[in-house]
Image (tube, rainbow, N blue to C red):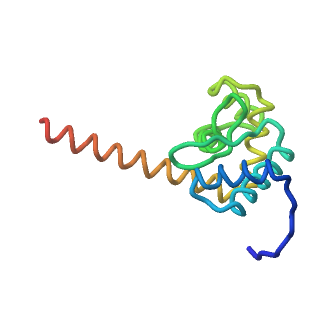
Amino acid sequence: MSRSTTSLRFDDELRERLAGLAAAEGTSLTALVERFLREGLAIAEYPGVVFKPGPSGRRAALAGGPDVWEIASALRRTSGSESERTAALADEFGIHERQVALALNYAAAHHEEIESRIRANDRALEEAEQAASQRKRLLA
């Protein structure tokens, strides 16, 4: 990704708040502002998508609902027509079909981000299963 310089002016209070948050998160002011801009654009483009913090970093999620990657991952376990799969996912997650469509639209537009989350979750699941298997053998 190429970078160019853009000059932005913030009032003193906003700049202090941004600098304080950047310091608390151990990041630069530029990186924080870029994150806010990227997330803000995504929220504007996909109303209903929010960004949640967590141990694995910030991730796209539905407001009051599951993470986008969880819906995209669950899609792989469903079959049928698009409307049948959407209905099944809505039922599984207890959300409206429009929210499923929103999550899938976001996932399609941000494919690498979502696939990376799914792969990380799959790896964590495999590691947990291996640890459980090892524990079971130790206790046998």
Q: Give residue 88's position: percent from left, percent from top.
A: 67, 29
Q: Where is residue 37 shown, x and y percent of the image?
A: 79, 54
Q: Is residue 34 above or below residue 13?
A: below
Vertical order, 10 against 104 (above or below): below
Q: Quadrant of residue 63?
A: top right
Q: At 76% across and 26% down in the image, what residue appears?
A: 96
Q: Nearer the viewer, residue 131 or 90?
A: 131
Give the x, y percent position of residue 130: 30, 47
Q: Residue at x 12, y 36 (%)?
A: 140
The residue positioned 78% from the left and 46% from the top of the image is 105
Horizontal arrangement in the rendering, residue 20 relative to residue 138 (left or right)? right
Pinpoint residue 123: horizontal percent, then vertical percent: 44, 52
Please name whichever residue, 56 or 140, is drawn nearer the observer in this view of the structure: 56
Q: Quadrant of the image for the N terminus?
A: bottom right
Q: Residue at x 73, y 40 (%)?
A: 50
In depth, the one of 64 and 74 nearer the eye is 64
In the image, taking residue 132 as reference, residue 8 lies left or right, namely right
Quarter-of-image position of residue 64: top right
20 or 122, nearer to the observer: 20
In this view, the residue farthest toward the front is 12
Marker count (numbered): 0
